[in-house]
Amino acid sequence: MVFLATLPEGKERAGVKEIAFAVNSPEAFTGKILQMLVRENLLLSVKGPNGGFLISEEGRKAPLYKIVQVVDGDSIFTGCALGLQECSEKHPCAVHYKFKAIRDHLTGMMMTTSLQDMASGIQAGVSFLKT
Amino acid sequence: MVFLATLPEGKERAGVKEIAFAVNSPEAFTGKILQMLVRENLLLSVKGPNGGFLISEEGRKAPLYKIVQVVDGDSIFTGCALGLQECSEKHPCAVHYKFKAIRDHLTGMMMTTSLQDMASGIQAGVSFLKT
DNA sequence: ATATTACAGGATATTTTTATCCTTTATTTA
DNA sequence: TAAATAAAGGATAAAAATATCCTGTAATAT
């Protein structure tokens, strides 16, 4: 997603191969993840010659939070630190409140971080997509 | 560890079976984790009749941080959010600084949380070790 | 001393996650 | 309209994490 967000206007589409290389991830595996993102409308795909993936309207507006949720589910935002099946205010684990603060921090960060935030560092050459 | 920390003076030792039941975890698997904690000197073990595990001097002083490190390694404290092999100030990923804040928050929380903190909530009946 | 209890640890199995392969389907361009 | 390109998706495989089994060894109590 970040790689696609760094593409210049006029060339905002890239194939699996190009994307996988850019992020140093196996091609077939990258393809599966791209499929998830297409199914959830964060990406659009185009088949055939000069096809590939590009960020959708919805995808471009989505915070990092949404992308993580689509790819990894939201256990990272809601799961219990100690692994309790039911862990809540009513039935908290031994670190429920302390861990909730961490999760809220994480969730907040991901809610307020946009692809554009991430892409601009890459574009400026100050942050990296691989190795 | 928390369960052992809740045991009263005079009965501070418990067997694998009792511990596994208390935290609703498979017995053999729990045994392996207890072994790790013994090897790292956070627990002491006693064989034979009336044997079992108890918290060592060192274990009782250890912050939650240390326990997590022994059981899960420290990738949770140092790993890159985007999975880059090398992610550092010199070669940061697109969320390096934002994620560092989260990790520091987590690390700080675990550094300052003691077993006693966790155990006292259990003892008071306000927090739980299972389900 | 011996029987019994309980942890230690190596070997093995299961499950989940990660990754690949291959056929099908859609699209483009010649 | 045919050939080529590229994503879609089901089936499969490999790797990693989680969990179990079983034999050995140490300690206790009778």
Image (tube, coloured by chain):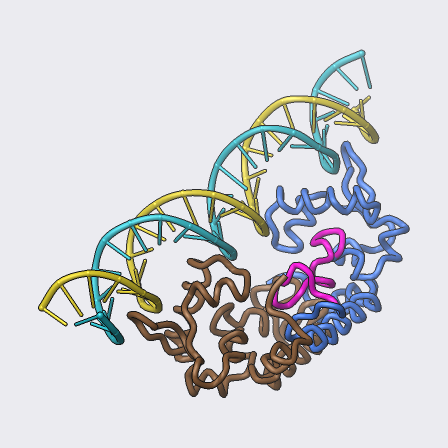
Chain colours: A brown, B blue, C cyan, D yellow
Nearest the viewer among A24 and B20 is A24
Residue shown at 66%/44% (left/top)? B17
Is C21 positioned to the left or the right of B81 in the image? left
Image height of C1 relative to A81, above or below: above
Nearest the viewer among A90 and A32 is A32
Q: Is residue A29 magenta?
A: no
Query: x and y percent of residue B118 in the render?
Result: 77, 65
> Residue B113 is drawn in which quadrant?
bottom right
What segment carries the magenta color? B69-88
| Main secondary structure found in the magenta portion | loop
Query: x and y percent of residue C30 in the render?
Result: 22, 70
Image height of D15 relative to B82, above or below: above
Residue shown at 50%/82% (left/top)? A8
- Image quarter of the C terminus of chain A: bottom right
Residue shown at 30%/70% (left/top)? A49
Query: x and y percent of residue B82 in the render?
Result: 61, 67
Image height of B119 relative to B46, above or below: below
Residue shown at 60%/69% (left/top)? A129
Nearest the viewer among A52 and B101 is A52
Query: x and y percent of residue B11 in the render?
Result: 82, 49
Image height of B5 relative to A57, above or below: above
Nearest the viewer among B38 and B81 is B81
What count of labels does the image hold? 0
Q: Is residue B75 magenta?
A: yes
